[in-house]
C-alpha cells in the first residue's frame, strides 16, 4: 500500500481530523511535528487489531530515519502496545 492510499483510507470516522493534520505534516515534511502527533495518536487512541503494525510498516517506516529521538519514542510506543 502506498502512503497516499494509506492516508486516504485513514480519513474517515472520528479520527479523520487527526489524519488530515498528519497528512499535512507529512506532505510538508514536518517530521518533528508529525512524530509528536503520531506519538499522541498511538498513546491515546484505541487501535483496531493489526492497525499499529500496519501504521508502522506502511507509514512510519517511510520517515522514521528522518527524526532521531521522537521516532524511536514512537517506534517503542507502537511495539509496547502491540505486546
Image (cartoon, helix red, strand yellow):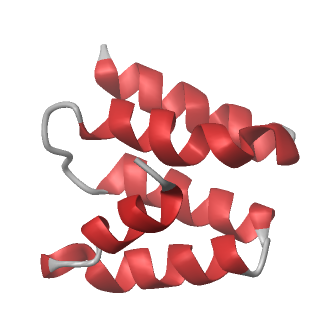
12 relative to 16 in the view: left or right:
left
- Looking at this view, name the residue that lies furthest to the top: 83
Q: Is residue 25 visible?
A: yes
Q: Quadrant of residue 71?
A: top right
34 relative to 37 in the view: left or right:
right
51 relative to 43 in the view: left or right:
left
- 72 above or below 17? above
Q: Residue at x 72, y 48 (%)?
A: 63
Q: Residue at x 44, y 22 (%)?
A: 79
Q: Is residue 67 visible?
A: no
Residue 32 in percent (x, y) is at 78, 62
Residue 66 in percent (x, y) is at 85, 47
Q: Residue at x 79, y 71 (%)?
A: 29
34 relative to 44 in the view: left or right:
right
Compare residues 28 and 3 and report the one nearer the observer.
Answer: 3
Residue 59 in percent (x, y) is at 52, 48
Q: Quadrant of the C terminus?
A: top left
Q: Quadrant of residue 50?
A: top left
Q: Quadrant of residue 75?
A: top right
- 4 above or below 50? below
Compare residues 68 and 60 and report the one nearer the observer.
Answer: 60
Q: Residue at x 34, y 73 (%)?
A: 8
What count of labels does the image hold? 0
Amino acid at each position: 500500500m502506498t502512503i497516499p492510499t494509506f492516508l486516504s483510507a485513514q480519513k474517515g470516522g472520528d479520527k479523520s481530523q487527526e489524519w488530515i493534520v498528519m497528512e499535512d505534516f507529512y506532505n510538508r515534511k514536518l517530521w518533528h511535528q508529525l512524530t509528536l502527533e503520531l506519538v499522541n495518536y498511538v498513546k491515546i487512541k484505541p487501535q483496531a487489531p493489526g492497525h499499529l503494525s500496519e501504521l508502522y510498516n506502511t507509514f512510519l517506516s517511510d520517515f522514521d530515519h528522518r527524526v532521531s529521538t521522537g521516532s524511536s519514542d514512537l517506534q517503542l510506543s507502537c511495539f509496547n502496545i502491540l505486546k
